[in-house]
Amino acid sequence: MSATVLVGAQWGDEGKGKVTDLIASDFDYVVRFQGGNNAGHTIVANGHKLALHLIPSSIMYPEVTPAIGNGCVIDPRVLIEEMDMLEREGFSTDRLLISGNAHLIMPYHLDLDGAQEHHLGTNEIGTTKRGIGPAYQDKAARSGIRVQDLLDAHIFELKVETALREKNTILSKVFGLSTYTTAQICENFKAFAARIRPHIADVGQLLNSELRAGKHVLFEGAQGTLLDLDHGTYPFVTSSSCTAGGAATGSGVGPGALKRVLGVVKAYITRVGSGPFPTELSTDSAIGTALSKVGGEIGTTTGRLRRCGWYDAVIARYSAEVNGLTDLCITKLDVLSVLDTIKICVAYEYEGQRFSTVPGQQSAFHHATPVYEELPGWRCDITNCRSFDELPQAAQAYIYRLEELAGVPVSIIAVGPSREQTIIRGWSANGS
Ligand code: GDP
Ligand code: IMO
Ligand code: MG
């Protein structure tokens, strides 16, 4: 009985969608276990380019069952739009399974996300404004509305009515925003319920019995380790558990089943939204501009420019520990081909102290000065390389160094956005 977890090991947008699509055919189920449509996962294969927000990135393989676990938050309008988009593109969503225990993002969550951010002023988190934080707030407060509530119109109405007593007061009295009526929300959700109902399942129980029967399960993380609610750069994080442990709580599969953990990192690093970023390059700098342009670093969900920086091996090492990484996948190595020399952050300095892992105290991380090592670039096109040996020596040396610094073997290297632009180094089928 074994399952594989794929997680982002930086601040998100590492290329999780591409890598999930690459390895998905080795699995029977691919499961999202946290987050919602704050995620934007891009897959490029067979002449299609898809930007997915909620549906697992295995959707191009009809034989793989996609599932959304209990740890996710679902905006039904967005989910249905995504299902419609996929059907138009020729990909069936008939087999999509949705946990009845996943929570719903309600219209007032979107308003509250915007209002809470506005309220923070210059301290804003820079959220995606998709209602993610407020939906998880309600989950933790035990006042959330779940997918299974869509199965009973009466219960759904009662829950909406109860929620609105509090939400309308906050919307109008605290933030001066318009309020909702129960009838209005119930009317809109009637159509959502009809569409989603056939997909609702006991995902946890199903996955456990399928794992016992020898089936293979891949958990697809969203966001990244440094955006994890507990282990990230709090408060500049998302509201869910993006690290590997979240795959257990977010699906109902016991942690003992999680045998292999693949951490995805870019060959450099990016971040969207606010918060500390030790290796950040200024957007005015030639290298910052080059990474942003060549890497196409524009948010898949919000269209915001991603902040770019040098690869941070301190973060990679931290992610390796927090997630128990067994394998590393380096994406976007091709983007570095434009550089003469490449820096790697190997440690931080703060107030005369040297840190080789992420400092426990936030202010040390905020004010950390990166200690860099510099390696020669390779300055040639590597997008057609399909084996490690085909990579120029300098690119191989860069990978060896990242591997050494993280203490985790690099099993997959991506050299372009499409499925085939990949070098498989030590990854075998079925997560074995
Ligand atoms: P995710 O959120 O982790 O799935 O990542 P995103 O899809 O938001 O962002 C990654 C972007 O990089 C997407 O546009 C991908 O198509 C692209 N991408 C992924 N791997 C590579 C790669 O190896 N090279 C290049 N040039 N682009 C890549
Ligand atoms: P994928 O899965 C990058 C960031 C937001 C913000 C913070 C909180 O594509 O890697 P939220 O809306 O979640 O409350 O915002 O988290 N963020 C992401 N950054 N990639 C993502 O997803 C992200 N999802 C959320 O920019 O800083
Ligand atoms: Mg993304």
Image (cartoon, rainbow, N blue to C red):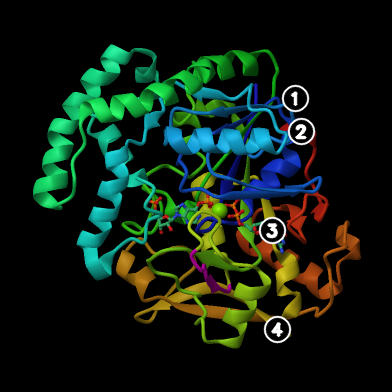
Where does label 1 land, which residue? Answer: 63
Say whether residue 388 is left or right of residue 122. Answer: right
Numbered label attached to residue 330 = 3
Q: Do the residues labelled 3 and 2 touch (CB within 8 Å)?
A: no
Image quarter of residue 100: top left
SS for dot 1: loop
Q: Residue 255 versus residue 242: which sits nearer the camera?
A: 242
Q: What residue type is labelled 1?
A: Glu
3 or 4: tag closer to the N-terminus: 3
Numbered label attached to residue 341 = 4
Q: Distance between the residues labelled 2 and 4?
A: 37 Å
- In reply to whether residue 30 is colored magenta, the answer given is no
Q: Residue 254 versus residue 382: which sits nearer the camera?
A: 382
Q: Distance between the residues labelled 2 and 1?
A: 8 Å
Q: Distance between the residues labelled 3 and 4?
A: 18 Å
Boundaries of the magenta span:
304-310
Q: How far apart are marks 3 and 1 (CA)?
A: 27 Å
2 or 1: tag closer to the N-terminus: 2
Where does label 2 land, which residue? Answer: 25
Q: How far apart are marks 3 and 2 (CA)?
A: 20 Å
Residue drawn at the location 44% of the way across and 32% of the way down: 76
Q: Do the residues labelled 3 and 4 touch (CB within 8 Å)?
A: no
Q: Which of marks 2 and 4 is in front?
A: 2
Q: Which of marks 2 and 1 is in front?
A: 1
Residue drawn at the location 88% of the way across and 57% of the way down: 387
- In reply to whether residue 305 is colored magenta, the answer given is yes
SS for dot 2: helix
Q: What residue type is labelled 2?
A: Ser
Could one spot residue 253 in this view of the protein?
no
